[in-house]
Amino acid sequence: MNAAHIEAMLRGAVLDEAFPGAAYAYGTAETVEHGEVGHLTYSRDTAVTCDNTYWDLASVSKVIGVTTLAMKWVVLGRLNLDQPVSEVIPEFGVRNKEAITMRQLLLHESGLIPFRRYHETISRPSDVIEAILAEPLQYRPGTQSQYSDLSMIVLGLVLEKIAGEKLPALLETEVFSPLGMTSTSFISGHPAAPTSRVEPWRRDIHRMRGVEHEGEYIQGEVHDPTAFLLGGVAGHAGLFSTLGDVTRFAQAMLRGEIVKPEVQAMFTTVASDLSTRALGWDTKDPVNSSAGRKFGRKSYGHTGYTGTSIWIDPDAKIFAVLLSNRVHPSEENGNIVTVRPRFHDAVMEYLVLNPPEVVAPETEPAAN
């Protein structure tokens, strides 16, 4: 296995229509190899992917965003993981949710439903938040683990309430700027890889907000419907970023630059008997994992619905990032499920034999 084989495999994935294009990086805390394959769409008339392509991170936003901020605030004493959410947001403490803790939100053991189609009945952000806070329990907290977007949305609201600031400013000041992630934000401000076709309900809400959506596809706007309803800013999705910035984040985790090692280990190690979940992060399932078979058991990472992923192996001291727009032109395409483990197996096999010795890609966008 060598670097050319990894690129060839991903080019093959483009031909198999797992995604129209992708950017990828892998390496150690100090070194990285990276590349890009394909175009922004399946038409060769569109731009090719590059270092500075902006990608809708989808649920990778959960770990790069609110989870990292929560991790920093635990160190600072600003966030108590065992505090009930209702002590910070009293409106949440209804329908037997009074005792749900911050820890249970991060572990996806809160009892909240995974997802609700709010976009079919609600259009105003304030109404969405009111509906989320009033949600009934699906199961008794701490007795099951069900991955829930709502849990991370609520955590984002908690962090905003504690700070008295909105997530974009909080994450920029406390996470992105200190790490030099100059191309990561909720509103990219730059052309991004297109995702799915614009749905009729999305066009309707645009019109209600006084905007006429142009174009056939969602581009530069969050794909996730609930995040869209919330104005593109939420704890579970909404961040846009580039390969360079996500690589920079992965290397900072490997170097232990964000928080002291014991706190980082607490957030990235299995923390419950109910699942493979850590605090905000997922860890490697021993049977079926997007990290493949060769990443170590202590590996932690996260995937995003749009076709993004980040995995870090703290024992081997390596990382792998794969960013794509697999939902273009349709989110019904699930071929990336087989590509991810093959990519990570190939990366591990190559890095064990050939540690990279090149510098990380720049994070600044190319000049227009």
Image: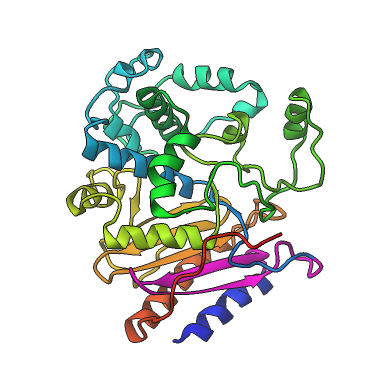
Q: Find residue 271 and report its image quarter.
A: top left
State the extent of the magenta-drawn residues as a range: 17-45
Position in image of residue 293 (x %, y %): 36, 70
Residue at position x 20%, y 54% from top? 261
User: x, y (%) of residue 220?
Assistant: 67, 47
What coloring was used for the rendering? rainbow
The relative height of residue 291 versus residue 275 in the rendered view (above or below) is below
Q: Residue at x 74, y 47 (%)?
A: 197
Residue 339, position as x, y percentages in the image: 53, 68
Q: Residue at x 77, y 33 (%)?
A: 203
Location of the N terminus (image quadrant): bottom left
In the image, is residue 189 part of the stretch drawn in magenta? no
Residue 21 drawn at (x, y percent): 65, 66
Q: Quadrant of the C terminus?
A: bottom right
Farthest residue, direction front: 367
Q: Is residue 337 above or below residue 276?
A: below
User: Is 102 in front, or is 345?
Assistant: 102
**Do we see residue 285 in this rendering?**
no
The magenta stretch spans residue 33 = yes
Front one among 89 and 332: 89
Relative to 331, say whether 297 is above or below: below
150 displayed left or right of 262: right
Q: Residue 313 falls in which quadrant of the image? A: bottom left
| For residue 37, side relative to residue 163 (left or right) | right
Furthest residue toward left: 262
Q: Residue at x 40, y 57 (%)?
A: 249
